[in-house]
Image (spheres, grey):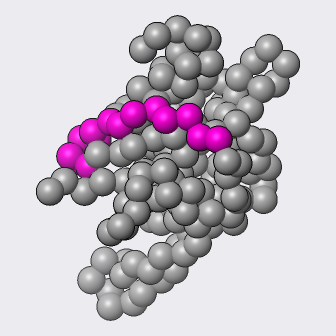
Amino acid sequence: MRPRSAGVLPYRRAGERIEILLVLPGGPYWRSRGPGAWQIAKGAIEKGETPEVAARREAQEELGVEVPERLLPLGSVRQKAGKEVEGFAVEMDIDPAHIHSNLFELEWPRRSGRLQSFPEVAEGRWFSPDEAMEQMLESQRPFIARLLEVLSGSPR
C-alpha cells in the first residue's frame, strides 16, 4: 500500500487577487532549497482518519491554526517517490510570522549519533498564483491549478 498524506492549501483574497500560502519544510535537507521546494502543509493520514481529518490535524501541527469548517477538496496527486497526497483548500488569512510548527527529531549530522530537533515547517509565505507555481514542489502544482479552477467556476 502506498504512503498517503493529506494537507491544506490556504488562500486569501487581496482585492481582486488571490494569494496562496505555501510552506518550506524544516530540517537540514530543505534548508538550502528554494524554488521547487515549497509545499502545502501536509502529513501522513493516520489509521482510522479520513483525509479531511488528517488535513485539519496537519494544519494544527504544522501551522498552529484551526481551519474553518469549510474545506474545498482538490483531489489527490502522486509525488515522485510514489506518495499520494490528498489536498484541501481553505480560505483564511494566516500571518506567516506567527506560524507555530511542531518539531521532529533527526540524527544530524548523519551517522553522528546525535539527535537534533527541527520544526516541521521552517517558513510560510504568501505568493501570487504564478509565483506559487514557480516555487511549489512540481508534483503538488496541480493543487494550485485546481484551486484556481474552482474559484473561477470553471470545470476541472
Question: Percent x, y for residue 102?
Answer: 58, 72
| Residue 136 seen in this snapshot | no
Question: Percent x, y for residue 58?
Answer: 53, 60
Q: Which one is in front, 28 or 46? A: 46
Number of numbered tags placed on the structure image = 0
Magenta residues, start to end: 70-83
| Residue 155 seen in this snapshot | yes
Specify the quadrant of the image occupied by residue 113: bottom left
Question: Percent x, y for residue 26?
Answer: 52, 62
Question: Percent x, y for residue 126?
Answer: 69, 37
Question: In the figure, 105 relative to 102: above or below?
Answer: below
Q: Which one is in front, 12 or 81? A: 12
Question: In the figure, 111 relative to 148: above or below?
Answer: below
Residue 74 lies within the magenta run: yes
Relative to 156, is 123 on the left or the right? right
Question: In the figure, 133 relative to 113: above or below?
Answer: above
Q: Quadrant of the N terminus?
A: bottom left
Residue sitting at x 82%, y 24%: 14
Residue 139 lies within the magenta run: no
Relative to 16, is 149 on the left or the right? left
Question: In the figure, 140 relative to 116: above or below?
Answer: above
Considering every residue shown, the one lying at the far left of the view is 1
